[in-house]
Amino acid sequence: MRDVIVVGGGCYGSFYAAQLARAKARGKARFRRVVVVDREPECRARRELGDASDRTFVVRDWRAYFHEFLGAAAPARSAEPQDYIVPSPLMPHLMFEWVLERARERWPGRPVDVAPVPDTLGTPYDRTAPAPDHTRYVSFADWICPTHCIEPAICPAIGGTRTWEMSDAVRALADRLRAAGQPVHGPALFVCRHHVFGVGTFAVDVVLAGDEIVRAAGEAGAEAAVLVGTISSCHGAVNLLTIGAVADGRGP
């Protein structure tokens, strides 16, 4: 890894930053630095861990930070280390908010909005946030999961084989919507996987690739939608980004 961005400096972020430091000290992880992003100058992670040569703290709102950081990011070159993001279970759907903002900047003359995610993903937990962003929170767990579970092949909550995979469920939903005649592209999926010592990550390159899916969906000028999800094997936040057609028909 190159830089590792930890979302939040509270209880989760403190744990993740500490685990990354332990992994590096034991030769299990290599990175340039860990960047902890929190609005509080003296967040818990800073109080407990402090600054270090390979750890820094950014005092910013998460949305503002990612607007700047991802907006300036470029895909890593072949064989170069990538930047990674460590999400928090309690964060809003930040990656979707970023690609939505990018789409609105890209097409200022077209309606770019959020629609409720239709149909079902077949998960026992399925709730849509009572907010304008219509984020749909889904989970295959109808039990309380162990803290910092790494989602192994044998589920520790049920003591049996994990037979589900959220990415399959979201892709199947996109296929069904297309089969029903809806202009749905993607899905653009930011999949958090266990990386090291209980820390889950996804690469910044994956987020940039999701933005490219949105760009490709809208560049023809026709009405389009993109299914976007930040997920793990068991849980996820899913949104539907909609792009209106070009009014004068002269292109995107």
Image: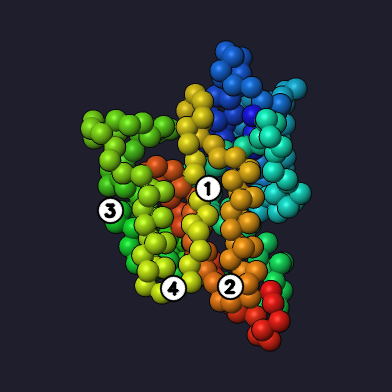
Q: CA distance from mark 1 to mark 4?
A: 22 Å
Q: Is residue 228 above or below residue 38?
A: below
Circle 2 crowding by C-alpha within 10 Å: few under 14, some 14–19, many from 20? many
Circle nearer the N terminus (1, 4): 4
Amino acid carrying mark 1 in the image: Phe
Q: Residue at x 64, y 29 (%)?
A: 1
Q: CA distance from mark 2 to mark 3?
A: 30 Å
Name the residue carrying label 3: 124
Task: Say which of marks 2 and 3 sits in front.
Answer: 2
Q: Position of residue 225 (x, y in %)?
A: 52, 69
Question: Considering the numbered disc 3 on the image, is that residue within a helix, a strand or a loop?
Answer: loop
Circle nearer the N terminus (3, 4): 3
Amino acid carrying mark 3 in the image: Pro
Task: Say which of marks 1 and 4 sits in front.
Answer: 4
Q: Is residue 228 left or right of residue 175?
A: right
Q: Residue at x 36, y 31 (%)?
A: 152
Locate residue 49: give its quadrant. top right
Circle nearer the N terminus (3, 1): 3
Task: Say which of marks 3 and 1 sits in front.
Answer: 1
Q: Is residue 154 left or right of residue 100?
A: left
Q: Is residue 203 above or below residue 46?
A: below
Circle 3 crowding by C-alpha within 10 Å: few under 14, some 14–19, many from 20? few
Name the residue carrying label 1: 190
Circle nearer the N terminus (2, 4): 4
Circle nearer the N terminus (2, 3): 3
Name the residue carrying label 4: 182
Q: CA distance from mark 2 to mark 4?
A: 13 Å
Task: Say which of marks 2 and 4 sits in front.
Answer: 4
Taking depth in this image into account, of 175 and 43 the one nearest to the observer is: 175
Question: Considering the numbered disc 1 on the image, is that residue within a helix, a strand or a loop?
Answer: strand
Name the residue carrying label 2: 243
